[in-house]
Image (cartoon, helix red, strand yellow):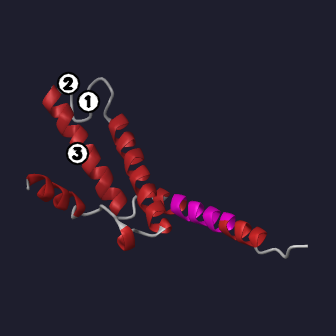
């Protein structure tokens, strides 16, 4: 019985998509672009305080370093979930346009009259 409850718990996990509830390809592209922008912003924040003295003063212990890393990740996710720097929007628009172009070229090559 524990296995059944584990499986049902996994299947009801938010974000796990199956069947008809699956997001559209454009939504998947947008989500991936937002995640990429979040990682990029996180790396920018991390590099901003990697210098010798630390970001908030001289020297940091291991706990402060871990706290700053978590703060960087949280801030990056918060920024990108509210529009971010605009990179996610540009990336997803570009990828969606490229997919539409590829799709229309594939469709037109399949629907051309046979001789």
Q: Is residue 21 above or below residue 30?
A: below
Q: Which residues are magenta?
A: 91-102
Give the residue number, with chain letter if any, for mark 3: 71
The image quadrant that residue 102 belongs to is: bottom right
Predominant SS along the magenta part = helix
Q: CA distance from mark 2 to mark 3?
A: 17 Å
Front one among 6 and 40: 6
Q: Which mark is residue 81?
A: none
SS state under label 2: loop
Residue 100 among magenta residues: yes
Front one among 13 and 63: 13
- Whichever of labels 1 and 2 marks the residue nearer the N terminus, that label is 1
Residue 52: x %, y % from top left: 30, 23
Closer to the observer: label 3 or label 1?
Answer: 3
Q: Which mark is residue 59?
A: 2
Give the residue number, with chain letter if any, for mark 1: 54
SS state under label 1: loop
């Amino acid at each position: 019985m524990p296995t059944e409850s584990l499986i049902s718990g996994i299947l009801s996990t938010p974000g796990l998509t199956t069947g008809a509830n699956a997001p559209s390809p454009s939504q998947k592209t947008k989500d991936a672009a937002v995640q990429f922008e979040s990682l990029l912003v996180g790396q920018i924040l991390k590099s901003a305080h990697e210098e010798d003295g630390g970001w908030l003063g001289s020297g940091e212990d291991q706990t402060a370093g871990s706290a700053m890393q978590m703060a960087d990740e949280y801030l990056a996710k918060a920024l990108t979930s509210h529009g971010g720097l605009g990179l996610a929007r540009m990336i997803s628009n570009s990828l969606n346009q490229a997919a539409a172009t590829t799709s229309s070229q594939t469709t037109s090559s399949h629907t051309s009259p046979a001789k």
